[in-house]
Amino acid sequence: MLNVAILDDYQDSALEMANWDTLSEKAEITVFNDHIHDREVLIKRLRKFQVICAMRERTPFPKEVLKSLPNLKLLVTTGMRNASIDIETASELGITVSGTEGLPYPTAELTWALILALARNITVEHQSVKQGIWQKDVGVGLKGKTLGIIGLGNLGSQVAIYGNAFGMEVIAWSQNLTSDLAKGKGAKYVSLDTLMAESDFVTIHTVLSPRTNGLIDGSKLNLMKKTSYLVNTSRGPVVDEDALIKILEDEGIAGAGLDVFDLEPLESDHPLVLSDRTVITPHIGYVTRETYQIFFEQSLECVSEFLSGTPVRIINS
């Protein structure tokens, strides 16, 4: 009997979203709803499993972890890209890494939810009404404001559509972007410094890579207007977290809407949680029923086809 682990199922939805009973005669499925930061504890938990299904980048699989899992034969990740898996080491160890498809629009939708929450003080007003206070703050409108998009790929392009629909001036920057490409996606190409300085809302949609790690550091944040907002639904390390905390504490920007962080899950006493200038969500950009159905149904397919000797959507082929 094969041992299969499903990791970081926070909502306890894996068994609901796909019919894992189809593997009942071949595999024993174990679902873990918690998250483990401690590497040694993680290795001890996972050592017996031949198959591990990971949820996005919640649990990293660097070289040290992979080498400590001698029974692992198949590592399934939701999505076709996972920067937290050492693909080269997996290949050297003979571990097949397979992925699933996903949906691009849920994260763009959450981005817009964060922008609106910041602009209209939704979380503040929500709590105020519950405390018996009727109207507490004055928000800002979006029409005529400048939306700066860092990374004009699939997600950034969708956000640009929303920005134009709201009557915003949309500007964009990414490392390979040109004026013509930006114009074709409803945006104006500008330099990164110009984007940071002129935008009323800066939203990040670039992938995490050595080139983008720490891309938005203190010097870039200091270019922003005091009335501007930063939104990050990409990856936490794209922004220098310490620098972001400092500029929020110094009231150097109006606020930040954040779905991603350096270390997740975020502790309840983290400065970004305690700040009254942030709107925080727990990395739910992709967390919709539609996305989860694709993730878990195709994760099941990856396991089933691997057992049949015909693995699908191999990332390290």
Image: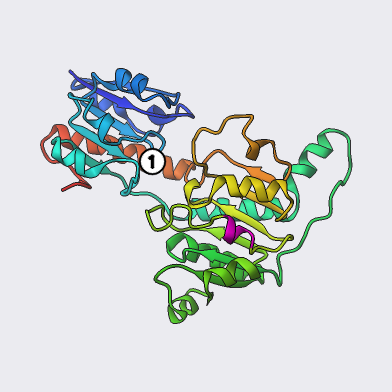
| Helix, strand or loop for the magenta stretch, by majority | helix
Question: Which coloring applies here?
Answer: rainbow
Q: Position of residue 151 (x, y in %)?
A: 47, 63
Figure quadrant of the N terminus: top left
Q: Position of residue 76 (x, y in %)?
A: 27, 37
Residue 6 painted magenta? no
Q: Is residue 150 above or below residue 190?
A: above
* Horizontal side, residue 177 vs residue 252: left or right: left
Boundaries of the magenta span: 218-222
Q: Is residue 14 above or below residue 289?
A: above
On the image, numbered disc 1 is attached to which residue?
56
Which residue is at 44% across, 81% downward? 180
Residue 219 painted magenta? yes
Q: Position of residue 291 (x, y in %)?
A: 43, 44
Q: Position of residue 244 (x, y in %)?
A: 61, 49
* Horizontal side, residue 4 vs residue 239: left or right: left
Indicate the secondary structure of the residue bearing disc 1. Answer: loop
